[in-house]
Amino acid sequence: MINLGILNLQGDVSEHLEATNNALNELQIQAKVIKVRTVSEVSKCQGLIISGGESTVIGKLMEEDGITHELKESKIPVMGTCAGMVVLGKETGYQQPVLGLIDMKVKRNGFGRQKLSFEKEVKIFDQNFPGIFIRAPYAYEVGSQAQILARINDKIVAVAQGRHIATAFHPELTEDTMIHKYFIKEVLKCVE
Ligand code: GLN
């Protein structure tokens, strides 16, 4: 049985758990969705989701607990949303530990004060997706290995690199499970 981990260090973890279970039901795939906190729990997973929250806190705890090292070694697919996107990138302009699994530079809280939170349709995988942005970051420099999946004006709000995917918005806060389903399929490809 596949284990899909939701990193439970800080942030909106339960919403991701529910969305992942809904996506599995829709795909009619059996997998265990578990909240994980320690490196040994993470090592039992075939895919990991890093939620929104505070990227500084999440990145620091991941590094201290050896999870950063584990993910770089095991190369399991990682999906990051909002703060999770920040953590997946290579650079933020701040002194904060990140994973660097996606070759992108990320601007934290990139949409400015007047737009700290907003909803906007995002065109991704040729579909319209209800994007919920909460103090969202955006990517401003993306390496040639990475693929830009969505933009809002000139701001890059979804990026994939190989098995990893990052979104600046929160797919776990909508009913639409499209992004979770995409990620589950990436995980399945890696275990086949
Ligand atoms: N601005 C936050 C950060 O940089 C992310 C906000 C969020 O995850 N909703 O960590």
Image (cartoon, grey):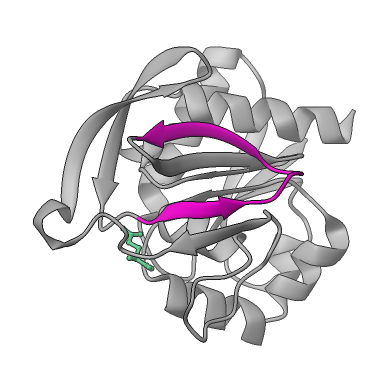
In this rendering, position of residue 17 left or right of residue 114: right
Q: Residue at x 58, y 42 (%)?
A: 33
Examine the image and state in which quarter residue 154 appears: top left
**Is 164 rendered above or below residue 182?**
below
Image quadrant of ligand 1 equals bottom left
85 above or below 10?
A: above
Q: In the image, what residue occupies the spot 34% across and 35% down?
A: 152
Point out residue 188 in the picture as x, y percentages from the top left corner: 77, 29
Q: Is residue 50 visible?
A: no
Chief secondary structure of the magenta portion? strand
Q: Is residue 146 on the magenta stretch?
A: yes
Q: Position of residue 57 (x, y in %)?
A: 44, 79
Residue at position x 76%, y 46% in the image:
46
| Residue 46 located left or right of residue 8 | right
Residue most extreme to the front:
154
Count of marks placed on residues: 0
Whether residue 105 is visible: yes
Tell me which segment is drawn in magenta: 137-152
Residue 169 horizontal/vertical position (percent): 36, 43
Question: Relative to 144, is 109 on the left or the right?
Answer: left
Assign the C terminus to one quadrant of the image: top right
The N terminus - image quarter: top right
Asked whether 6 or 89 is in front, the reply is 89
Does the magenta segment cover residue 96? no
Q: Is residue 117 above or below residue 9?
A: above
Determine whether 71 is above or below 61 in the image: above
Residues 54 and 112: in front is: 112
Q: Position of residue 139 (x, y in %)?
A: 48, 52
